[in-house]
Structure formats: C-alpha cells, structure tokens
C-alpha cells in the first residue's frame, strides 16, 4: 500500500486526508482523515456512500455484509455468497430512507419483559434522528422520551428484586445493589417493521462493586449499540435494502 496525502472533493466541501492508504491492485482507497466536515462512513465504512469500503466493493460484494458479535474476536464478512438461515429463525426488516447513506431501520415500539411500552413511532422518525445499528458504540442510545419509558419499565421490573442505589458508573444509571448469584434480568425487544429483535443483554454488572446497571443511554437519536447486538448474526443487503438476522453461536 502507498501512503499519500490527497484531497477528496464533494459538492459541499473538500476533505483533507493526510493518511490515506491506496491499495492499487484491488483499486481500493482506504484510510483516515484529520479534517472531514462531512459525516462520512463511520469507523470502517459500511454505508451507501461511494467512498465507503462497502461502496467501493459493492459490485464484487453484491452490497452485502455480515457480522456476529460476542465476548471475543468477531469477524466481518462481505460478499454475494453470504448465507442466511432458512426457516422461522431468520427475521427480515427493510432498510428505509434509501436516499440517505446511513442504513436506517423502521422501529415502531419497544417491549420490556414482553410488555409493549406503547412508544410513539414518531420518536424514531428521521426528524428525531432515525434508528440504525452501530458496532462502534458500546451501549444502545435511545431518544430521551423513549429512554425515560424504558428505564421506568426496568425499574418496575427490579422493584422487590434489587435495591436501587444513587450512583453513576460508566455514565450509566440507575444502578442497583447486586445480590450474589443474581441473574434474573429482563428482556428488551425492538419491534421493527416485520421483525422483532430481542436483545440478549440489557444490563451490565460489576461483581467487585456488587452493582448492576441498565446498559442504555439517553440521546438525541436511537442507535442500537454493540452490547445489545451480541449473539445475533446480522446480514445487511444495500442492493435489496434488507436486514436479516437470527440468533447464532458467534464464537463458533
């Protein structure tokens, strides 16, 4: 690979990249920028923009990529031959707002321990930042009104099980006093258009401090973070504008 300085010009502004790797054989441009006024393609580049890694490999990959996160090494796969899973285990939901580079999803509601919260779909609209998945953030971020309802539902669940404590760790709250051997955590289900996704992990704990906390943050938009994606294989297809997913042994 050659290391060069270059300018990439867009209609809005130009971007100065002082460390840009050029992989000549595969005609792939890949690197980082120290000045970029535009919101580009994330840490790796898995969106619809032509300069993203997925965009440059779109013809060869068929616009498809897949990953499966767990507590260990995880791998990204790109290609037309990525296999899904036949049958009822696989869920499919559309990618929406296809004129945007971000891979937005249509989230309509959230459930905690099987109980729908009756959230307004407008909380997840493009006007309120939309909804998408991001492996680059650790915990799920919810639009503030949705966050408040989800947290209250968790608090109701833990009432009589764990004692709520006035503490903040890792910028998360509320925290609860952890009982030895406690592992009775509630589920959280994201109701997408045509598919329900149940997050396997909703809380984090520190046994040395004897505390546990809801692994959700308030924000201006809704982003499904890495922890809530664990042990599920996701297959994105930007040519067909679909997301497929199913539970999997990501360590296998």
Image: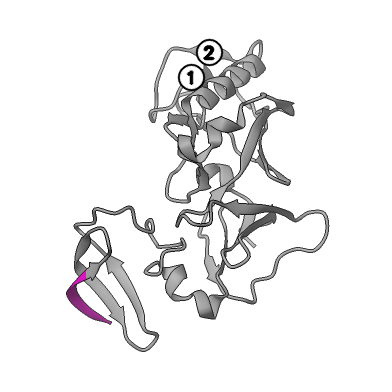
Residue pictured at 65% horizontal, 32% vertical? 109
Tell me if I can see residue 76 in this picture. Answer: yes
Residue pictured at 74% horizontal, 29% vertical? 114
Residue named by callout 2: 164
For label 2, the crowd category at 10 Å Cα-Cα, with few meaning under 14, some 14 to 19 and many 20 or more, is some
Outermost residue on the bottom side: it is 25
In this rendered view, identify the residue nearer to me: 206 or 98.
98
**Residue 194: percent from the left, percent from the top?**
73, 46
**Residue 100: percent from the left, percent from the top?**
46, 54
From the image, which quarter does the C terminus lie in? bottom right
Residue pictured at 57% horizontal, 20% vertical? 149
Magenta span has 5? yes
Residue named by callout 1: 174
The dominant secondary structure in magenta is strand
| Region in magenta | 1-7
* Relative to 198, 38 lies left or right: left
SS under mark 2: strand
Place residue 169 in its image quadrant.
top left
Magenta span has 212? no
Q: Does 79 appear above or below 215? A: below
Residue pictured at 19% horizontal, 57% vertical? 35
From the image, which quarter does the N terminus lie in? bottom left
For label 1, the crowd category at 10 Å Cα-Cα, with few meaning under 14, some 14 to 19 and many 20 or more, is many
**Residue 250: percent from the left, percent from the top?**
62, 58
In this rendered view, identify the residue nearer to me: 122 or 178.
122
Place residue 9 in its image quadrant.
bottom left
Q: Are marks 1 and 2 in contact (CB under 8 Å)?
A: yes
* Relative to 244, 63 lies left or right: left
Tell me if I can see residue 203 in this picture. Answer: no
Place residue 228 in its image quadrant.
top right
């Amino acid at each position: 690979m050659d290391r060069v300085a270059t300018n990439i010009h867009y209609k809005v502004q130009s971007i100065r990249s002082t460390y840009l790797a050029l992989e000549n054989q595969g005609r792939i441009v890949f690197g980082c920028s120290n000045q970029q006024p535009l919101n580009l393609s994330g840490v790796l580049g898995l969106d619809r923009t032509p300069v993203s890694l997925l965009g440059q490999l779109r013809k060869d990959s068929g616009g498809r990529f897949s990953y499966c996160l767990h507590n260990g090494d995880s791998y990204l796969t790109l290609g037309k031959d990525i296999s899904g899973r036949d049958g009822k285990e696989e869920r499919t939901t559309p990618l929406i707002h296809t004129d945007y580079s971000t891979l937005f999803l249509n989230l309509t509601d959230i459930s905690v321990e099987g109980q729908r919260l009756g959230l307004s779909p407008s909380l997840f609209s493009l006007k309120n930042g939309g909804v998408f998945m991001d492996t680059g953030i650790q915990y799920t971020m919810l639009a503030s009104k949705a966050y408040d309802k989800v947290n209250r539902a968790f608090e109701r669940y833990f009432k009589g099980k764990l004692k709520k404590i006035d503490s903040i760790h890792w910028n998360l709250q509320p925290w609860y006093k952890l009982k030895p051997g406690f592992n009775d955590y509630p589920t959280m289900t994201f109701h997408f258009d045509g598919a329900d996704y149940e997050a396997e992990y909703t809380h984090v704990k520190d046994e040395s401090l004897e505390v546990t906390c809801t692994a959700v943050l308030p924000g201006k938009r809704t982003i499904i973070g890495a922890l809530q994606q664990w042990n599920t294989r996701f297959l994105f297809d930007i040519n067909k504008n679909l997301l497929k997913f199913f539970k999997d042994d990501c360590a296998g």
